[in-house]
Image (spheres, grey):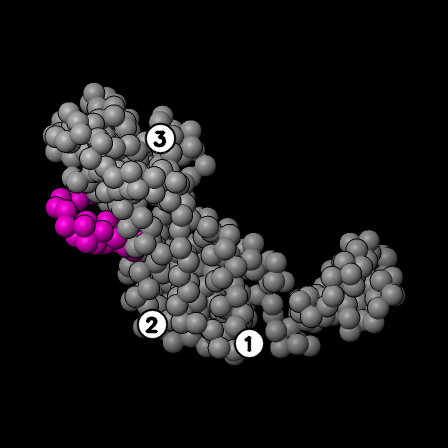
Amino acid sequence: MSPRVTMADVGRLAGVSHQTVSRVLNEPHRVNAETRDRVQDAIKSLRYHRSTVARALATNRTRSVGLISTGLALHSHSKRMIAFNEAARASGYQVSMASLPTAEREPMQAALDVLMGQGVEGIVLIVADKRALDIIDALDLDVPLVVADSGGSSDRHNVAIDQFLGARMATAHLIELGHSRIAHLSGPDWSLDASERLRGWRTELESAGLPVIEPLEGNWTPESGYERGLELAASGDVTAVFAANDQMALGLLHGLSDGGVGVPGGMSVVGFDDIPEAAHFIPPLTTVRQDFVQLGFQIMSTLLGLIDDTDVPEFVHTEPQLIVRKSTAAPSASVSGRPASAVSASGAERGNG
């Protein structure tokens, strides 16, 4: 057997002390880029692997964090998980994950016990289900916790993309185009994201003095969007729809088409998430984009601040972005009862910018 490569061996090859090698491995931000690159090249060349047990004993730090997620494997949910994993690795941390299909006290407690047994330095909870917050708030933890909760309703440190604002942006876009009867295809009532998007739609309509129509409930799937699309095509009560996610918007487009309603000529549609396929829907979908990469780094930054006992904001909410494509337009005269020219030039410009 070849002798085990040590930190001192790496240091000799890189021309630095073993203490510098240790800093590159444990606190890379404290080492200048040139030295850091030289050490990392030496690590790769020698195929050096750290002993996690020895590191933990020497530093009292395991360089590992826990991630618990609850709810369905939705696009936005999985993207949050992936983004956090990437941010943790960039900070030199490993992530131990527990994914729970539903938010129940016993499975969540069991997941927490396993993570704590692994010596994680902190835990992130990515919440899809409202019940998860009640459970986690009732538990006592010995390590810092950051909650990715779009509603901001937890007493814990919270980092999220502002779903409420994104929904207001989507609804405001339709209002600026001249729509006055705007429906909402919501997600299920257990979902925090769905609640915030519903609240944003309602708030924007009320602020504009427009009627708030009874929301149509979906379940995040294209099938539920298709069924609601057929219903809307048959009723003819609205000229625009804000769907709470792009998957339901896809089904909605299909249902409207089968019901004989063109988009955007007969109905404008806005989604939420900007999934990779959204630009290739027929027509390409106007939607709300979320920056999950930024979110992942903000979650990790907040968790590291708590681990290091530094002051960090209790709430960090970032803004989403409205992406305007071809599924939205001013209502036609035959649909709205008023000419499309009634939309102000400034409003049309903002809506298509």
What kind of element bears circle 1?
loop
Mark 1 surroundings within 10 Å by alpha-carbon count, few (fewer than 14), some (14 through 19), many (20 or more): few
Q: Which residue is mark 1?
A: 308
Q: In the rendered image, is residue 154 in sight?
A: yes
Q: Amino acid at mark 3?
A: Lys
Q: Which of 93/287 is in front? A: 287
Q: Which residues are magenta?
A: 191-217
Residue visible at 54% across and 70% down? Answer: 304
* Of 142 and 86, the residue lying toward us: 86
Nearer to me, 221 or 194: 194
Residue 207 lies in magenta, yes or no?
A: yes
Q: Is residue 125 left or right of residue 237?
A: right
Numbered badge on residue 326: 3
Mark-to-mark CA distance, 1 and 3: 48 Å
Residue 317 x/y as whole percent: 40, 61
Quarter of the image with the N terminus is bottom right
Q: Which mark is residue 155?
A: 2
The amino acid marked with disc number 2 is Asp
How far from the left and from the top, in percent, is residue 167?
29, 49
- Mark 3 and mark 2 in contact? Answer it, CB < 8 Å: no
Question: Which picture quadrant has residue 86?
Answer: bottom right
